[in-house]
Amino acid sequence: MRIQAGLRRAPRPSSDGVAFVGMPLIVMRNDSLLGLYNGDIGIVVPDRDHPGGMQAVFQDALGEIRAISLSRLPEYEAAFAFTVHKAQGSQSSSVTLILPEKVSPILSRELVYTGATRAQASLQVWGSPEVLSAAIERSARRPTGLAKRLQRREMICP
């Protein structure tokens, strides 16, 4: 967040005061008409058709590049770094998983697994061996009672 705040203060061309050329962004809300979905990653580039304007480019599953004006995008945020939760459903060639300095009750085997499996080619894990070991030993499984409710047929399905 401090990096992002510093970059926002730096003088850069921007039509809305937030985005700038070269900024990676993550889509936060689905827009099926544009074919953009929560977690899609793009890069802000100059808009060749509108001098001074900006657009975001996205690569689809087939490798095709699409450019969309920033004004048409659904809600988005800068994506220099983001949480494992926001990364779910996304892939990246390179991932750095940064662990907290101390053991945390919310850091679990499942969270580490989800973060690690976002990497397609390389993964770096930054943190102490003790924190990583504690995370791997902790399971986030929570008793929901769903299996019992289904067995007792307490849930009604249309």
Image: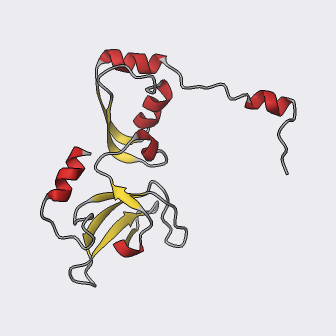
Question: Front-most of 154 and 96?
Answer: 154
Please identify the quarter of the rendering in which residue 10 is found. bottom left
Residue 80: image x %, image y %?
Answer: 28, 50
- The colour style of the image is secondary structure
Q: Residue at the location (32% across, 52% down)? A: 79
Quadrant of the rendering where the N terminus is positioned: top left
- 61 lies above or below 130: below
Q: Residue at the location (48% across, 25% down)? A: 109
Q: Residue at the location (44% across, 63% down)? A: 60
Asked whether residue 68 is in view, the answer is no
Taking the image as shown, residue 140 lies to the left or right of residue 15, namely right
Residue 5: image x %, image y %?
Answer: 22, 51
Q: Residue at the location (43% across, 63% down)? A: 75
- 42 lies above or below 119: below
Q: Residue furthest left?
A: 11
- 133 lies above or below 153: above
Question: Front-most of 37 and 149?
Answer: 149
- 107 lies above or below 117: above
Residue 11: image x %, image y %?
Answer: 12, 64
Taking the image as shown, residue 85 lies to the left or right of residue 23, namely right
Asked whether residue 3 is in view, the answer is yes
Q: How many marks?
A: 0
Residue 56: image x %, image y %?
Answer: 33, 68
